[in-house]
Image: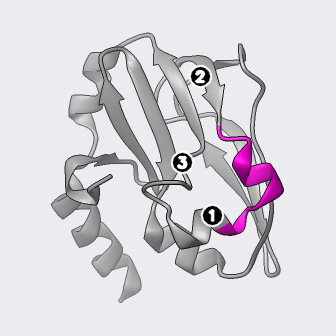
Amino acid sequence: MDPKSLRFTPTHEWVSLQGDVATIGISKFAVEQLSDLTMIELPAIGAKLAAGKAFGEVESVKSVSDIYAPLAGEVVEVNNDLRDNVQLLSDDPYGKGWLIRLRVENPGAVASMMDHDAYEKMVAEDAH
């Protein structure tokens, strides 16, 4: 996926919306900050997620970080390849490293998220 077409949250999750199904992942910046990834925990299919609440964790050699739901909805697909090879997240965070697909309750909520340029600006400001 082209990161310029995605929407982002302040907690570094990204969203690609197709109809009422959102593909969700974490940004390349977040993956780089975590560095050496060791494990990921993701929800089960059918789990109901609340916007802004943690739905999983990603572990690296230096920390454990929560992953937050950018939207409310029901998990319809989980990237099980990550459980076997969390390195996919580092190698391709906007492609093979996607996390879950969510049937969203309010697709219009995506419009209030940051576009790529706004996200890049936030990341640059945080780095200083």
What residue is shown at x 32% (from left), y 29% (from top)?
A: 17
Residue 76 appears left or right of 46: left
Amino acid at circle 2 = Ala
From the image, tell me which residue sits under label 1. 88
The percent coordinates of residue 50 (x first, y second) are 59, 22
Tag nearer the camera, 3 or 2 = 3
Q: Amino acid at mark 3?
A: Trp
Q: What's drawn in magenta, residue-wise?
A: 79-87
Label 3: how many Cα within 10 Å (few below 14, some 14–19, many 20+): many
* Placement of 99 over or under 20, stated as above or below: below
Residue placed at 78% from the left, 25% from the top?
44
Q: Is residue 60 found left or right of 5 in the rendered image?
A: right
**Along the polypeptide, which appears first: circle 3 or circle 2?**
2
Sequence-wise first label, 3 or 1: 1
Q: Earlier in the sequence, mark 2 or mark 1?
A: 2
The spot of residue 47 in percent (x, y) is: 72, 17
Residue corresponding to mark 3 = 98
The residue tagged 2 is: 50
Q: Quadrant of residue 53?
A: top right
Measured in 3D between alpha carbons, the distance from the residue under mark 3 to the one under mark 1, in whole angstroms, is: 9 Å
Q: Is residue 70 above or below residue 26?
A: above
- SS of the residue at dot 3? loop
